Each structure stands twice: as C-alpha cells, then as structure tokens.
Image: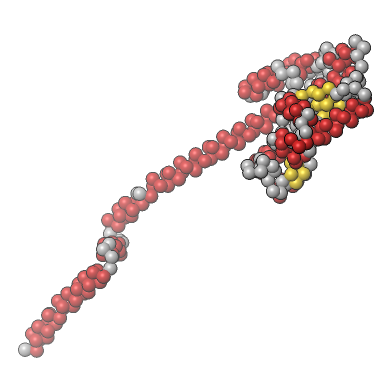
C-alpha cells in the first residue's frame, strides 16, 4: 500500500514541475522583447545540436552572407591599388619626360656629329614609343632643337643682337622689361612648417618649383593660393617676386621667354646698368600691387633714374600680362594722387 502511495505522490509532482518551468518561461517571455525567445531557442538549438550533422550546415549558412562583403572589400582594395599604380606610373612618366628634356637641353652643346649614328639609333629604339614621339615633338621647338647647334653651343646663324652690332649698332635707349606671369618668378620668404625649408627658393619657375610641387602638392598649393577675402597672401605666408634679370630669363631649362632677348641685347652691348627687369607678383591685382609692394611707384622711380643716368627716354618691353600692366602704368602716372595715381 505504501508503494502506490509513493507513486501517486511522485507522479503528479513531475507534471507540475515541468508545467511550472514552462509557465515561468512564458512569464519571462512576456516581459522580454518579442525576438528574445527565438534567439534563446536558436542558442538552445545550437548548444544541443553542436555535434549534430545539421550544425555544420547551419554554420555554412551563417558564413554564406559574409562572402559577398568580403569579395566587395577585395574589389574595392583592388581598385584602389590599380588607381594608385596608375598615379605612380603617371608620375614616373612625367619625371622621365622632364629628366630627358633637361638632359637634352644641358647636352645640346655637344655636336650631334660626334655621336655615332649607330648609337643614336640604338638609343632611339630603346626608348618607349610615347617618350620617343614626345622627344621628336620637343625637338621641333626652338629652345629644345638639339640638332640646330654648332660646336660652340650657339646656333649656326648669329643672333639678332650680333647682327645689329655687326651693322654698327650700339646701345642707346635703356630698357625696362615687364614680363608676363609665366616668367615672373616667385620665391618664398615666410611660410608654414611644411615649406620653411624652401626659404628664398622658387615656388614658381625653375626646377625648384617642380621639386616643391612633387614633394608636397598640398603644401605648395597652400603657399601659392591667395586669401579669397583679402586677395593677398594668407596669414603666415609671404611670397614675393624674384628680382633681377635672372627672374625673367628662363622659366624652366629649355623654356625661355626673355633669355634670348637679354642675350641679343648683350650682344649689342647692353649690360645690367642699362637693362632693368620690373618683376611683379602676377597673382595680385594692379591695385594690390601698388598697395602692398608699391610696384608702380618703384617702376616710375626706376624709369626716372635710367633717364637721368643715360639722358635718353626708356624703352619699355612688355610681354603677355605685362602689356596690361604697362598700359595701366601709363594711365597711373598721369593720374593725380588724389585720384589714386
């Protein structure tokens, strides 16, 4: 009689226990977010079926959506590498082009007859097609035509100045050169930390400009651009025009604007006492040139000094934007100070 009584007591206690657990589970589920039971069920299924065959399939299904993102990342990284490689190739080509052009200019004094034709053909065929065609194009320019020089490093025909001197011409009118923006060199007098090592070096003109640009393009642009509000240099930067004839003779090796004119004037008999280069900061407006640098005041004094020394009028030689400044200057000197002259 005792055994059945134990069984009757134990049997009903098992059901309430399972029911209580389920009821607790339902009560907890009511207080939790709606998606919590599913997450718990997934955790139970994952824990109970870790060794089941379906577990590996579940893992594969979970890993499947990650593949497109990984492949997309590979595509993006591959595209970045390709674009970076293209930029590097472009820079290499530009550097090779500049080096070959400068080498051709510096070696143009060597007579081409001294170089064997077989060696010239080997060099020509060894160069890439794009560089070879570019050199043929550059060789047609007067400044880079290496075949038009004789053994003395000068052209076969005499310069216009030499011809004028042979005809009995002598220096008479002093000359003031007003260059354009290409041949007006700009040098750094004050700059940010990234450009302080370029103190008194060209930021515009000569190979120093290329060195500053390729070393840090962002830094170069910071020093070259003007303040959009004031129209002047930004705070902490001072870029000024290079003075002297060397500021206007050559923009870069092989690209001259006033170099040959100065050379011809020297052949006639001119020297730095009778030639003056009125360089300017071509980034500024004429009003800012006078307000910041006193450009037209100094140009007026230089012209008057040359007239006083030589006793004859001055010849103003202008080129490109310099012609606009000369016209502005001629109107400026006839304007009263009260009106801004």
Q: Residue furthest bottom?
A: 2
Left or right: 269 in relation to 294: right
Give the total number of marks visible in the rendering.
Answer: 0
Q: Position of residue 74 (x, y in %)?
A: 46, 43
Say which quarter of the image contains residue 51. Answer: bottom left
* Front position in the image: 228 or 332: 332
Say which quarter of the image contains residue 305. Answer: top right
Q: Position of residue 47 (x, y in %)?
A: 30, 64
Q: Position of residue 246 (x, y in %)?
A: 82, 31
Which quadrant holds the N terminus?
Answer: bottom left
Q: State whether residue 211 is above or below residue 36.
A: above
Taking the spot 79% from the left edge, 30% from the top edge, the residue there is: 333
Left or right: 293 in relation to 89: right
Taking the spot 30% from the left edge, 55% from the top edge, the residue there is: 58
* Front position in the image: 46 or 106: 106
Residue 322 seen from this side: no
Q: Residue furthest top?
A: 167
Which quadrant holds the C terminus?
Answer: top right
Q: State whether residue 111 is above or below residue 288.
A: above
Residue 19 seen from this side: yes
Taking the spot 86% from the left edge, 16% from the top edge, the residue there is: 161
Q: Position of residue 237 (x, y in %)?
A: 72, 46
Say which quarter of the image contains residue 250. Answer: top right
């Amino acid at each position: 009689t005792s055994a059945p009584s134990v069984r009757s007591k134990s049997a009903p206690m098992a059901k309430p226990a399972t029911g209580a657990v389920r009821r607790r589970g339902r009560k907890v589920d009511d207080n939790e977010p709606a998606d919590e039971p599913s997450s718990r069920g997934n955790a139970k299924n994952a824990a109970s079926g870790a060794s089941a065959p379906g577990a590996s399939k579940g893992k594969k299904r979970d890993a499947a959506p990650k593949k497109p993102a990984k492949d997309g990342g590979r595509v993006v990284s591959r595209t970045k590498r390709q674009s970076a490689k293209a930029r590097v190739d472009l820079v290499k080509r530009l550097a090779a082009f500049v080096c070959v052009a400068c080498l051709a200019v510096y070696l143009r004094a060597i007579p081409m007859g001294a170089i064997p034709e077989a060696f010239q053909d080997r060099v020509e065929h060894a160069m890439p097609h794009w560089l070879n065609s570019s050199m043929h194009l550059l060789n047609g320019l007067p400044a880079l035509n290496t075949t038009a020089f004789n053994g003395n490093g000068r052209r076969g025909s005499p310069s216009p100045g030499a011809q004028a001197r042979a005809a009995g011409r002598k220096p008479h009118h002093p000359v003031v050169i007003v260059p354009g923006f290409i041949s007006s060199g700009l040098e750094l007098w004050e700059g940010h930390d990234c450009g302080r090592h370029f103190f008194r070096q060209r930021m515009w003109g000569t190979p120093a400009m290329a060195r500053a640009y390729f070393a840090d393009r962002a830094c170069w642009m910071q020093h070259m651009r003007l303040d959009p509000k004031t129209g002047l240099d930004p705070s902490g930067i001072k870029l000024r025009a290079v003075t002297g004839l060397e500021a206007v003779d050559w923009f870069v090796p092989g690209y001259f604007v006033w170099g040959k004119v100065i050379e011809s004037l020297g052949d006639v008999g001119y020297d730095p006492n009778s030639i003056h280069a009125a360089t300017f900061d071509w980034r500024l407006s004429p009003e800012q040139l006078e307000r910041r640098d006193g450009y037209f005041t100094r140009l007026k004094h230089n012209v008057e000094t040359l007239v006083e020394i030589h006793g004859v009028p001055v010849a103003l030689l202008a080129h490109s934007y310099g012609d606009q400044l000369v016209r502005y200057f001629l109107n400026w000197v006839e304007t009263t100070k009260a009106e801004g002259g």
